[in-house]
Image (spheres, rainbow, N blue to C red):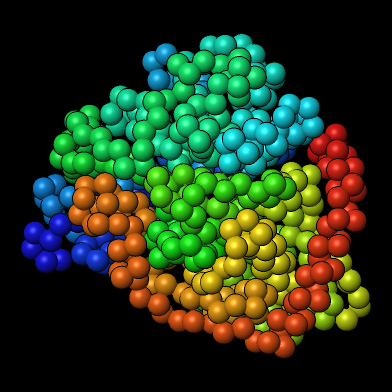
């Protein structure tokens, strides 16, 4: 790399991996490194991770990118953090974990979420906090801990997210940014403070939560042990940053009102930015903080690329063998099979709720369903139907956002699915809108780096990021396919409505017999 070029590092603490990406001028990627880690599912419906493993991944990834660039610590101008939302862990008075990190995919608090909605002013809490009532969020998780593990709940000194734990290890301070806090269900959007009524409901005090800071808050004075292991100057400015979802909008350039970002990785999400806070009368969308003039309205889906992985792992043995023999990715082979089938999978429809569902239904009991199966349907029909089901889920979220914020004028895509031209075109056809594919696939890390530069005053606004981003390709919708998908989407929504009660019945059966 060029001598003495300033480097900004974006660290993205994700669900399945932590990535550190070094960026140069105008957001140019200089080096990156990722470390994967597992999700621990000790009981049905549980989803946890080892916080020590994730903290180690942060240290090692930052060290790796600095080593790859062969630069002195003085060339690192700043570090910005991004992290997955809704994680929760309990710490003792010495900062040691009393639990693993409970992540967004954990559904153990289904009953608590249902009770919050039915009996405990859940919709009112949502309208104050912007976080829909669902087992993903820390609010019902905390209620579960209080009821199911009361001794642990009483012993807990601090309840924190994964990013808070990382920052505590690095600095010995408990701080949480407004963005992560706004995804807890405990944070009032209007006052930018903890919600006293929710704390009273939980029997918690403010002292058990971290100090609230803006997303642009700067930390200095890192513990020397960790600075040395990462190859950093202890006084390098570290910007607390925000959540991965809101930063992905920045990282793809979907920053102005009406511009939407669609991310499909393990899960999926659709988000747009509003200059003011906006919640939905029906409770379908979230509203999370980014800056005082940027509020991210959107909705996440539980079921994205994880469904293709499920297909590959559980039903794709022949494809894995063939792909290995040909030296190609098994996903590429699955996609080639799906391409043989016309839009609509010849009447095979898939409700993709294998992990329950978040937006727009917020129903942890929702289950996956194939509908319309006939003897004519082959392996490739099921593969395409799964991919189409993911797109229908994303489309349903986009429609809910449109109701809250107004029409979506532009759609930019990122995440693992963005590497597949076939899947991108399918989504363009489903939504009936042109899709733009930005150059970066590490949108959250770029967003974290850009927010760091904004915090330091090196860029005048987050809008600057739009000038950094090159559009690699565009997908214009096929009108004939759009008409087919419009007809099938109507069936999709009616099917969900008719099966909703049955989902509750089968989910209850699974919990009793799982």
Q: Is residue 443 visible?
A: no
The quadrant holding residue 163 is: top left
Residue at x 66%, y 24% (from the top left corner) = 143
Q: Which quadrant: the N terminus?
A: bottom left
Q: Position of residue 367 (x, y in %)?
A: 79, 52
Residue at x 70%, y 47% (from the top left corner) = 281
Q: Position of residue 215 (x, y in %)?
A: 36, 42
Give left or right: position of 273 versus 171: right
Q: Position of residue 498 (x, y in %)?
A: 90, 56
Give left or right: position of 456 versus 325: left
Q: Position of residue 138 (x, y in %)?
A: 58, 32
Give left or right: position of 9 versus 497: left
**321 relative to 196, above or below:** below
Q: Is residue 477 visible?
A: yes
Give left or right: position of 205 versus 27: right
Q: What is the count of numbered marks?
A: 0
């Amino acid at each position: 790399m060029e001598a003495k070029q300033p480097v900004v590092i974006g660290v993205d603490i994700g669900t399945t991996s932590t990535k550190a990406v070094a960026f140069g001028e105008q957001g140019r990627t200089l080096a990156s490194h990722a470390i994967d880690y597992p999700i621990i599912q000790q009981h049905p419906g549980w989803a946890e991770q080892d916080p020590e493993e994730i903290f180690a991944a942060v240290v090692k990834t930052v060290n790796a990118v600095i080593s790859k660039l062969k630069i002195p610590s003085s060339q690192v101008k700043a570090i910005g953090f991004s992290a997955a939302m809704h994680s929760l862990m309990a710490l003792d008075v010495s900062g040691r974990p009393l639990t693993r990190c409970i992540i967004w995919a954990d559904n153990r608090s289904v009953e608590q979420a249902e009770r919050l909605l039915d009996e405990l002013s859940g919709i009112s809490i949502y309208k104050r906090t912007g976080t829909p009532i669902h087992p993903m969020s820390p609010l019902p998780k905390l209620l579960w801990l209080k009821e199911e593990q009361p001794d642990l709940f009483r012993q807990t000194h601090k309840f924190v997210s994964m990013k808070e734990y990382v920052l505590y290890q690095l600095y010995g301070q408990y701080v949480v940014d407004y963005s992560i806090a706004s995804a807890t269900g405990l944070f009032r959007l209007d006052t930018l403070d903890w919600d006293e009524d929710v704390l009273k409901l939980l029997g918690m005090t403010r002292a058990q939560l971290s100090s609230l800071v803006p997303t642009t808050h700067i930390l200095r004075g890192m513990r020397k042990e960790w600075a040395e292991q990462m190859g950093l100057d202890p006084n390098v400015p570290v910007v607390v940053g925000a959540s991965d979802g809101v930063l992905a909008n920045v990282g793809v350039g979907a920053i102005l009102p009406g511009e939407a970002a669609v991310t499909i990785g393990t899960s999926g999400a659709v988000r747009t930015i509003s200059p003011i806070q906006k919640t939905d009368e029906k409770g379908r969308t979230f509203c999370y903080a980014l800056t005082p003039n940027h509020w991210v309205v959107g909705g996440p889906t539980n079921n994205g690329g994880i469904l293709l992985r499920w297909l590959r792992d559980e039903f794709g043995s022949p494809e894995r063998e063939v792909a290995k023999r040909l030296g190609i990715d098994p996903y590429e082979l699955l996609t080639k099979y799906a391409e043989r089938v016309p839009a609509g999978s010849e009447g095979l429809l898939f409700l993709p709720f294998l992990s329950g569902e978040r937006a727009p239904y917020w129903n942890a009991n929702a289950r996956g369903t194939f509908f319309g199966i006939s003897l004519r349907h082959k392996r490739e029909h099921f593969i395409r139907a799964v991919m189409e089901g993911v797109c229908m889920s994303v489309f349903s979220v986009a429609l809910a956002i449109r109701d809250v914020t107004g029409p979506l004028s532009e759609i930019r895509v990122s995440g693992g699915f963005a590497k597949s031209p076939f899947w991108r075109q399918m989504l363009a056809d489903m939504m009936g809108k042109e899709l733009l594919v930005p150059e970066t696939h590490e949108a959250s890390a770029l967003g974290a780096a850009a927010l760091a530069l904004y915090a330091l005053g090196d860029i005048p606004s987050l809008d600057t990021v739009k000038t950094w981003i090159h559009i690699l390709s565009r997908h214009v919708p096929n009108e004939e396919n759009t008409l087919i998908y419009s007809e099938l989407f109507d069936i999709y929504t009616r099917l969900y409505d008719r099966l909703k009660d049955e989902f509750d019945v089968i989910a209850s059966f699974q919990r009793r017999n799982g």
